[in-house]
Amino acid sequence: MSDYLVQFNNISKFFGKVIALKDVTMKLRKGEIMCLLGDNGAGKSTLIKTLAGVHKPDEGEIIVDGKKTIFDSPKDALDMGIATVYQDLALVSLMSVTRNFFMGREPLKGPPFFKIFDVKTANKIAAERMGQIGIDVRDPSQAVGTMSGGERQCLAISRAIYFGAKVLVLDEPTSALGVHQASVVLKYIVKAATQGLAVILITHNVHHAYPVGNSFTVLNRGKSLGTYEKKDISREKLLSMMAGGEELDKLEVELNEMNRVSNS
Ligand SMILES: Nc1ncnc2c1ncn2[C@@H]1O[C@H](COP(=O)(O)OP(=O)(O)OP(=O)(O)O)[C@@H](O)[C@H]1O
Ligand SMILES: [Mg+2]
């Protein structure tokens, strides 16, 4: 049996003439946080959408739990325990916290064929689960739109765990958050991994990825620059590998030169 829970082997994906991914290989163990890094348009979201059942890869294979897997729909992926929290967050602002927590999987009560939504139980579970991660939801019937960005991310993660996800995929969960909220979300992600979940954390932000990641994969224009265990790569090296690193270094040199000239 393979040591890895998820394996992407030589995945390619084309959109017409656009090569979104070419020959990307990436592996993930249970209880591990793998950070997927790369600049805008590098192919990060496309890669995880092949695991979430949104896109079928044009080349390569995905192996989950040792079995070659082809997902025909997002539901197939969800049934295999792969939960994805998308960049634009699949929450409905005007619906309540509880409704967003259950999303069509609400607990029911009553006799067979006459079952109704068990609001009380659902509210209790939603509030309890949010409470466990330190988010005090005073009124679970309040609209999700009234929660902060960090609280909404935590809700989406907590929902995935409650419904038994094995693999949690988070696409830029901290990009819209301030320092404090980002650290709350990151702490929660680490907690999820220590409970045995495998996490793919997509981010632009090396400073968010480095403290929590066990391994790092860098994508650059659809190609992988490799996967590194934390002990084998420094934060600085990761920063410079991401596209733009070198350009920013050059920019700094140019700005220094401009300052020198204007001060002389
Ligand atoms: N449905 C699509 N149709 C056509 N092209 C697409 C589609 N989805 C993605 N692409 C292209 O594939 C490339 C990779 O896009 P992708 O969204 O995976 O990048 P990303 O790394 O997630 O970027 P960002 O950091 O901005 O979210 C881009 O050039 C994008 O324009
Ligand atoms: Mg993206």
Image: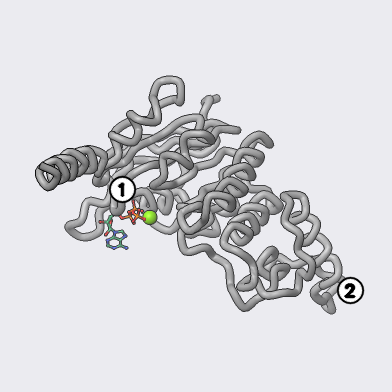
- In the image, what residue type sits under mark 1? Asp
Of label 1 and label 2, which has the lower sequence position?
1
Residue at the image position 83 percent from the left and 75 percent from the top: 115
Q: Assign a secondary structure to mark 2.
A: loop
Outermost residue toward the right?
111
The quadrant the C terminus occupies is: top left
Looking at the image, do the residues carrying marks 1 and 2 touch, with CB atoms under 8 Å apart? Answer: no
Ligand 1 closer than 8 Å to label 1 CB: yes
Q: Residue 80: x and y, percent?
A: 58, 48
Q: CA distance from mark 1 to mark 2?
A: 52 Å
Residue lying at the far front in this picture: please name it.
Answer: 264
The label on residue 200 is none
Q: Quadrant of ligand 1?
A: bottom left
* Viewer can see residue 80: no
Judged left or right of residue 219, residue 258 is left
Residue 44 image position (x, y, % from top left) = 37, 48
| Nearer to me, 192 or 108 | 192
Residue underneath mark 1: 39
In the displayed structure image, the side of residue 239 where residue 168 appears, left or right: right
Give the residue displayed 72% in from the left and 74% down from the top. Answer: 142
Q: Horizontally, is 68 left or right of 93 in the view?
A: left
Residue 110: give its label: 2
Q: Is residue 76 visible?
A: yes
State which quadrant residue 148 falls in: bottom right
Residue 226: x percent and y percent? Answer: 33, 31
The quarter of the image holding the N terminus is top right
